[in-house]
Image: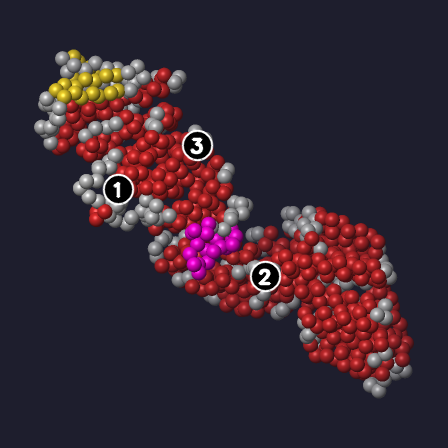
Amino acid sequence: MEKLLFSPSFYLFHVVFLSFVLLSMIPIRGFLTFNFSNSGKYRVECFNMKSKSLISKRQISIRLRKMIKCICSGEQLMVDELNYSSESLATRDYSASGGYSSRPGEIDTKVDNSNIEEAESSLRESGYLNYEEARALLGRLEYQKGNIEAALHVFEGIDIAAVIPKMKVSISRRCEPNRRRSQSDAMPPMSMHAVSLLLEAVFLKAKAFQALGRFQDAAHSCKTILDTVESAMPEGWPENFVSDCKLQETVANAVELLPELWKLAGSPQDVISSFRRAMLYRWNLDIEATARIQKEFAFFLLYSGCEASPPALRSQLDGSFVPRNNIEEAILLLLILIRKSVLGNILWDPSLIDHLSFALSISGEFMTLAQQIEEFLPENMERKERYYTLALCYYGEGEYMNALDLLRNSLNHRENSDCTRELLIASKICADNKICIEDGIKYSCKAISQVYKSCMHMVAIANCLLGVLLSSKSRSAASESERVFLQCEALGALKDAERMMRESDPYIVLHLCLEYAEQRKLNIAFDYAKKLIQLEGGSSVSGYILLARILSAQQKFVDAELVIDAALDQSGKWDQGELLRTKAKLRIAQGKLKNSVETYTFLLAVLQVQHKSLGTTSKVVKGKGNRDRRLEMEIWHDLANVYTALSQWQDAEVCLAKSEAINAYSASRWHTKGLLFEAKGLHEEALKSFRKALDIEPNHVPSLISTACVLKHLGGQSSSIVRSLLTDALRIDRTNSSAWYNLGLLYKADLGTSAVEAVECFEAAAFLEESSPIEPFR
């Protein structure tokens, strides 16, 4: 008998080897020989007849654990007639390839009980450990110790392609119903424990590749696991499938890891395919794992920037909803997750609301978001946050008063001490839509008092909204002195906002530009318009249009047209509608009526192609489609006015018929029709059209002025009625030169008024005419 000292660093190989020894030490009729090749591979040859075990599996387990304990304690073990190298399989293979060389005492001797149990299980099921299983166990040990390269080297020694067919057969036979089996069926080529061990080795190999930055190889290794299981069980993982729990754990980990590996490998389409595969195939995942996969897939669809193709036809059920794009698929996943959370199947995740809000907002589905929020339980969302989010939904949907009412309810609640967000949103709704101006001023002032000296950025925003609201109030002031006072206050608030901002804000610059332009300080307005275009980087056509209007007010029509041409070069085809209309109006102002007709005709063709191309697939497209229809209607009105000026009555009537097909109840259409009748000399018919326009929109300024002019021409009406119509027009728009001019004519013809009033009206009309833009600044 010869003494042999085992190194604690490499005990696993001895576990494997001594397992063979332990089983072979059973008395048999015959003899055993152990042969070792130079490459480190071993072969156990058994000669003679059948052998029968004389010790139970329980005894094998006890003896095996005693041997492991002895090995790990560093004691000497007596083995008869054995003489082999003390180097482990991993050490020998890796050293031969130029890697590290291991010596006794260099590596921690900590025992991994799971490896011992794996060896026991394999021995109990099959009575032996083959070469692949031994490498799988040894590779796992090296991986657990942090020797990633050594572990990978061991794993690469496993010919996984050769054992995959056996694994498939073993898995498929295990999941067959008992009624389909017969006594004559051959035993599976591999035990389920061996299958689990080898699949875990493939998974750890993928993890090793990942740790070394070889993401493509890692993804392919991980995909091998899923391909094997899916091929063996094409109908999915049976619910009553009884097997080693380690196999289920390995497969579940591989399902979750594969999309992440494809992300790291930079293959977005493979990421999408792996996510869909994880959700469509029955992997028998727990509900939390399924929720994690759905959430990660939704995030990837929203923020990856990769356009996903629709799911394959074979995965689509009859009558089921099939997402058409990334956003729809992400919304569907987020709604499923929220439903699970509300039902208590998974833990509540507040971030789901943020992502769903983003997805539905860019889709224009604000009311869908509002419905989801209304269904949440009180413990899922605070009352203040619920009201605020609902207000934003209604605001986005265009229901401004409902949004304002929700904000008022939130502001009136006693518990809401810090309500700066609500105050600012309420102020913005009032400012942008010119509703409840007094309330908006009150909200913005309260916001300034709450955040004063604590957050200058918020104070600047509140001051800006206050300036916009004061400017709106000035346009409806009862007296000239009040109007001037409110304009000064508005301009001061906007300047304060600009001064408080660390960086220039486009919203503040825009309203400063508009305020100076309306006060006819055109040079200052021109500078702010150029600054606005620079801040926006030319991304918005509104800045170019505003600059062109300011230039037209300075009577620089050629320069204004050059600005529009530059904007047309930088903008997309579908964003050129307002630009082309502005260009046509500039040509009208220069007397180029026929050129303007060509521009309008081209614009109508663009709108028609755009309408057919975009369709009405989403609410965002529908909203843009509604704006385009309104623009088309105004273009027909402009064309009708041009044809009227050219005395082409029939063409003008055709344009009005086209406009009527879009909207028969348009004040602008009836006013244009009245101008056509007036040009024909049909003043009575013109008056009827103007009155119909005022019935639809009582504050329609052009119709007020035209009605006054026709009444004055027809006579028979008192001058007070005409004066009332003109003063109403000036009350709404004090910068209308035509209203001032006609009022001056009325004062001149009225002998009961002084000539001074007529002169003042003519002076105002002359000043405004010289500085009037082709279209109103706002």
Q: Nearer the viewer, mark 2 or mark 1?
A: 1
Is the C terminus in the top left, top right, bottom left or bottom right quadrant? bottom right
In the rendered image, the vertical position of residue 69 relative to residue 590, given as above or below: above
Residue 505 position within the rendered picture, expressed as x and y whole percent measured from the top left: 65, 51
Q: Nearer the viewer, mark 3 or mark 1?
A: 1
Residue holding disc 3? 217
Residue holding disc 2? 616
In the rendered image, the vertical position of residue 458 relative to residue 717, given as above or below: above
Which one is earlier in the sequence, the residue at label 2 or at label 1?
A: 1
Residue 679 position within the rendered picture, expressed as x and y whole percent measured from the top left: 84, 75
SS assignment at label 2: loop
In the rendered image, the vertical position of residue 59 relative to residue 388, given as above or below: above
Residue holding disc 1? 173
Q: Nearer the viewer, residue 629 or 719?
A: 629
Amino acid carrying mark 3 in the image: Asp
Residue 291 position within the rendered picture, expressed as x and y whole percent measured from the top left: 39, 50
Q: How far separated are the C-alphas under marks 2 and 3? A: 44 Å
Determine contact: label 2, label 3, CB under 8 Å: no
Amino acid carrying mark 2 in the image: Thr
Determine contact: label 3, label 1, CB under 8 Å: no
Residue 359 position within the rendered picture, expressed as x and y whole percent measured from the top left: 51, 54
